[in-house]
Image (spheres, helix red, strand yellow):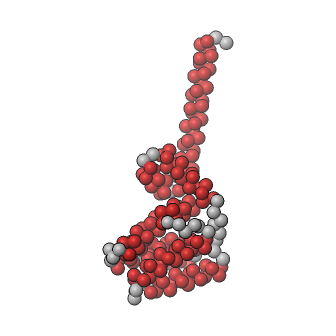
Amino acid sequence: MSNSALAIAIVIAIFVVVGIAFIVRKQRSQRLRTRFGPEYQRAVQETGSTTQAETKLEKLAKRVERFHITPLSRESRADFVATWQRIQSRFVDDPKGALTEADKLIQDLLGSRGYPVTDFEQRAADISVDYPLVVEHYRAGHDIAVRHSQGRASTEDMRQAMIQYRTLFAELAGEPEIRRAMAAGAARG
């Protein structure tokens, strides 16, 4: 084989390897975008790099895979739903207390499902693996709960936090009745 033929073969091999690497990276990005939804873009914005964001999300997914996440038992679900309904009904008379209880109930629910109940940012990141479409509700509700604890949240803010928490609660509890009621309310306007 001549030197020029060898050089051409090497160039072709390099192009093939680069092409395969490009395809693999594109598939990885698409897989992560699909799995994490809006959380993918959030990670890109936080890290400033697609590569760093994807590495972060893959590490997070591997972390959560080690957890023993389980669905709620029928009895446990019923208890959580009854508690949620009691908290919601208290909101009219005691919005501050209801919001504090709702925040705590979400933490208890996460713990019952098998998520570690660490600091808020880690909890939010952990649930983003399995619930990427509702984790923003958790962040928004928690942000208002924090402002409430600092005396900087209005009653309307607290109402919005309860709505955010209700959406998250329905997903985490796997509660179809709550999801149907929310969809019916959204359809009415």
Residue drawn at point x = 64 percent, y = 71 percent: 71
Q: Position of residue 136 (x, y in %)?
A: 46, 64
**In which quadrant of the rendered view does residue 13 lie?**
top right
Q: In x, y percent, where is residue 181?
A: 51, 78
Relative height, residue 109 to residue 53 (above, below): below
User: Position of 121 compared to 68: left or right?
Assistant: left
For the point 58% across and 27% down, the residue is 14
Q: Position of residue 45 (x, y in %)?
A: 42, 51
Position of residue 27 in the picture relative to residue 137 (left or right)? right
Residue 138 visible from this viewpoint: yes
Q: Quadrant of the C terminus?
A: bottom left
Query: Is residue 124 among the parts visible in the rendering?
Result: no
Q: Residue furthest top?
A: 2
Q: Position of residue 73 (x, y in %)?
A: 66, 77
58 horizontally vs 42: left or right: right
Taking the spot 32% from the left edge, 74% from the top edge, the residue there is: 152
Give the residue furthest to the bottom.
93
Q: Nearer the viewer, residue 94 or 187?
A: 94
| Vertical relation: 137 (above or below) 31 | below
Q: Hey, which quadrant is residue 145 in on the image? A: bottom left
Which residue appears at 52% of the width and 48% of the height?
54
Tell me how many marks there are.
0
Q: Quadrant of the N terminus?
A: top right
Tell me: 97 left or right of 172. Answer: left
